[in-house]
Image: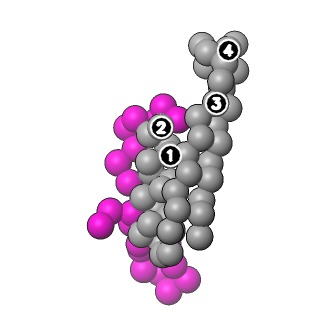
Amino acid sequence: MQVKMIFTSESEADGFQGSTTVVRDNVDDLYGLGRAFADAARAAGYTYVEDVGFEKDDGSMVFGDF
């Protein structure tokens, strides 16, 4: 699966006008999806994001680190 995330910035709120696009191919599991979301968050300026996790329906957690 391909995941594409687009962040749009406006000059008044963000100090510049433009966009950041993150595209990740071959996202086949929750680990890859978590890593893609974490990388996209950092690319959008949330530089303090270390990882992203998902809680599954059985209560277990899956994080994007490998």
* Horizontal side, residue 1 vs residue 50: left or right: right
Instruction: Please report whichever mark, 3 or 4, sits nearer to the chain's N-terminal start.
Output: 4
Rounded to the nearest whole Å, what is the CA distance between mark 3 and mark 1? 12 Å
Residue for badge 3: 19
**Between disc 2 and disc 3, whose residue precedes?**
3
What amino acid type should be assigned to the residue bearing mark 2?
A: Ala
> Which disc, if any, is residue 40?
1
Q: Residues within 10 Å of mark 2 (few under 14, many from 20)?
A: some
Q: Quadrant of the C terminus?
A: bottom left
Mark 3 or 4: the one toward you: 3
For the residue carrying disc 3, how many other residues have a C-alpha within 10 Å: few (<14), some (14-19), or many (20+)?
A: few
Q: Quadrant of the N terminus?
A: bottom right
Q: Are marks 1 and 2 in contact (CB under 8 Å)?
A: yes
Q: Residue at left 52%, top 57%?
A: 24
How far is mark 2 from mark 3, CA to CA? 10 Å
Is 47 on the left-hand or right-hand side of 58? left
Q: Which residues are magenta?
A: 44-66
Marks 1 and 2, how far apart at CA: 5 Å
Whether the magenta-drawn stretch holds residue 1 is answered as no
Residue receiving disc 2: 43
Instruction: Give the structural element (helix, strand or loop) at label 2.
Output: helix
Indicate the secondary structure of the residue bearing disc 1: helix
Label 3 near label 2: C-beta < 8 Å?
no
Q: Earlier in the sequence, mark 4 or mark 2?
A: 4
Residue type of the residue flagged with mark 3: Ser
Question: Relative to 43, is 11 above or below?
Answer: above
User: Mark on residue 64?
Assistant: none
